[in-house]
């Protein structure tokens, strides 16, 4: 069961009350933080900083949000104004020129000021999904997305895939190996398929077929 | 230049035309709204000029002579791909350069008279004028380093720390925020730049014993030479440069800090007060 914040219970059924405030906090990949709301410049409690921050009125629209009780699929979008700034440069343009909001961490709350609690909460990372001459729209992405994990492309084969002398290899020998098991200088680490080499290890009990390996092969 | 071709050089009756080329009374002097505005639900709106469009007038010539309408049509045809000048004699004699747009609605109404009703004249940006607008008391507006909401509109660049910084001042009892630069050796090349939509401008910088020297460029071209903001006594904001003959367009006025001062000055500070812009 998802616990319902106790302060909201008291105001949840009230027929009148303060309208909610959209609060969006963003921290870009360089560590800069931005605090945006749909109200005039005002201090609101911040999640990213843990203390009150001035939220500037940049947020034009938030949502719709889709919750699927799964961190991977929670999603929403945010539209911020792209008009403010000096007479030469717009604020959003200046931010995007100096850093990037692609992959920036965000925390969004639909905040009930009377209860000091959020009706709606969403966090994740941002991606720029569109811009017009006066707005910029960001879409939320989850923190965890395996499809975006980057890993080195390696093949598990009879030729070692590690860089000689690199951190994963760990060799401190003066001469380079031949990227084979026979020439390996750190035998506990080679990334090599121990195939059944021709007679080198005596008769194998492994039922895998024997392959003739040209040991002079190097990459 | 085409601007010197004036549709109605005089407000008087022209014997040769048996008429006057001035349009009828009572037309709307429209100025296109070029402000882009967005407004968060609980805040003041953000605005920005996005077009250099100028004025437009729906003009009518009712019960006019054939010669008058003939000449109007010639202006319509000749300057479809060009521009000419029209003078608003009733509106203070201000010149406008532009051309007629839309179709040309000439209608014969009998007795040799013709009507041309609601012909649109549209002002043209970026072109030269015979006489640039000069009613600074009524047509010009003042823009400051910060707008009325406190948002910084003056773009600044600093090569050194400290660079430009806002300075809350009380000038004749009125609270004003200027943008100041210390003008130290490392500040040479610092600039403050304001982009506006309009015609000419008057630049106001603070003058007094502690102010130094700068140069000013308009759209990247230096104008006015070196400006010395030194004065023996505190004079407050003073007009240090005026450029009146500037066409309607977006313009950038940039104050470049020289990091130099008059021998009598106590400091080389440069302080941006405001820009008066002709609209």
Image (cartoon, coloured by chain):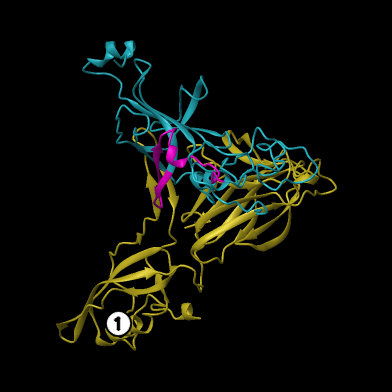
Chain colours: A cyan, B yellow
User: Is residue B179 found left or right of B267 in the rendered image?
Assistant: left
User: Is residue A163 found left or right of B264 in the rendered image?
Assistant: left
Q: Is residue A132 magenta?
A: yes
Residue B136, compared with residue B169, is above or below; it is: below
- The residue that mark 1 highlights is B19
Q: Is residue B153 magenta?
A: no
Q: Chain of mark 1?
A: B
Q: Residue furthest front?
A: A203
User: Is residue B190 found left or right of A41 in the rendered image?
Assistant: right
Q: Residue furthest left?
A: B110
Number of dots carrying numbers: 1
**Label 1 element class:** loop
Residue A198, compared with residue A69, is above or below; it is: below
Graded by Cα atoms within 10 Å as few (under 14), some (14 to 19) or many (20 or more), the crowding at tag 1 reads some
- Asked whether residue B45 is in view, the answer is no
Q: Which sits in the foreground, B110 or B229?
A: B229
Corner quadrant of residue B44: top left
Q: Which sits in the foreground, B15 or A15?
A: A15
Span of residues in magenta: A128-157
Q: Which sits in the foreground, B28 or B196?
A: B196
Question: Where in the figure is residue B194, as x and y percent of width and height?
Answer: 57, 52
Question: Where in the figure is residue B220, as x and y percent of width and height?
Answer: 63, 62
Corner quadrant of residue A191: top right
Corner quadrant of residue B108: bottom left
Residue B108, compared with residue A202, is above or below; it is: below
Question: Where in the figure is residue B249, as x and y percent of width and height?
Answer: 49, 63
Taking the spot 33% from the left edge, 66% from the top edge, the residue there is: B57
Question: Where in the figure is residue B275, as x and y percent of width and height?
Answer: 57, 51
């Amino acid at each position: 069961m998802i616990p319902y914040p106790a302060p909201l219970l008291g105001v949840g059924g009230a027929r009148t009350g303060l309208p909610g405030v959209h609060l969006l906090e963003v921290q870009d990949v360089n560590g800069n933080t931005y605090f945006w709301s749909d109200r005039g410049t005002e201090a609101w409690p911040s999640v990213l900083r843990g203390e009150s921050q001035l939220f500037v009125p940049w947020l034009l629209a938030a949502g719709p949000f889709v919750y699927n009780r799964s961190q991977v699929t929670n999603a929403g979008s945010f539209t911020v104004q792209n008009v403010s700034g000096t007479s030469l440069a717009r604020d959003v343009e200046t931010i995007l020129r100096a850093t990037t909001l692609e992959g920036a961490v965000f925390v969004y709350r639909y905040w009930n000021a009377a209860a000091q609690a959020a009706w709606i909460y969403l966090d994740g990372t941002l991606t720029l999904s569109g811009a017009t001459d006066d707005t910029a729209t960001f879409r939320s992405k989850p923190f965890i997305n395996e499809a975006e994990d980057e890993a080195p492309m390696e093949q598990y084969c009879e030729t070692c895939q590690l860089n000689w002398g690199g951190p994963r290899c760990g060799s401190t020998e003066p001469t380079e190996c031949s990227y084979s098991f026979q020439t390996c200088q750190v035998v506990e680490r080679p990334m090599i398929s121990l195939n059944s080499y021709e007679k080198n290890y005596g008769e194998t009990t492994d039922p895998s077929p024997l392959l003739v390996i040209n040991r002079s092969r190097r990459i | 230049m085409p601007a010197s071709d004036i549709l109605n050089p005089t407000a008087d009756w022209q014997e040769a035309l048996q008429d006057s080329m001035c349009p009828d009374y009572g037309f709307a002097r429209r100025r296109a709204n070029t402000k882009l505005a967005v407004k968060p639900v609980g805040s003041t709106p953000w605005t920005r000029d996005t077009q250099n469009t100028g004025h437009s007038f729906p003009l009518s010539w009712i019960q006019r002579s054939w010669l008058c309408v003939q000449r109007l049509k010639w202006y319509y045809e000749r300057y479809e791909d060009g521009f000419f000048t029209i003078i608003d004699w009733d509106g203070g004699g201000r010149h406008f350069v532009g051309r007629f747009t839309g179709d040309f609605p000439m209608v014969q109404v009998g007795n040799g008279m013709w009507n041309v009703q609601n012909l649109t004249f549209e002002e043209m940006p970026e072109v030269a004028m015979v006489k640039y607008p000069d009613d600074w008391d009524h047509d010009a507006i003042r823009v400051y380093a910060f707008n009325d909401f406190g948002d910084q509109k003056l773009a600044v660049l600093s090569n050194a720390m400290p660079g430009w910084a806002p300075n809350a001042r009380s000038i004749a009892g009125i609270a004003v925020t200027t943008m100041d630069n210390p003008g130290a050796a490392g500040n040479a090349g610092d600039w403050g730049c304001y982009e506006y939509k309009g015609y000419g401008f008057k630049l106001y910088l603070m003058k007094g014993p502690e102010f130094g020297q700068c140069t000013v460029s308009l759209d990247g071209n230096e104008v006015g030479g070196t400006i010395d903001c030194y004065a023996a006594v505190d004079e407050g904001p003073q007009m240090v440069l005026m450029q009146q003959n500037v066409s309607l367009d977006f313009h950038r006025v940039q104050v470049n800090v020289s990091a130099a001062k008059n021998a009598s000055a106590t400091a080389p500070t440069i302080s941006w007060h405001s820009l008066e812009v002709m609209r």
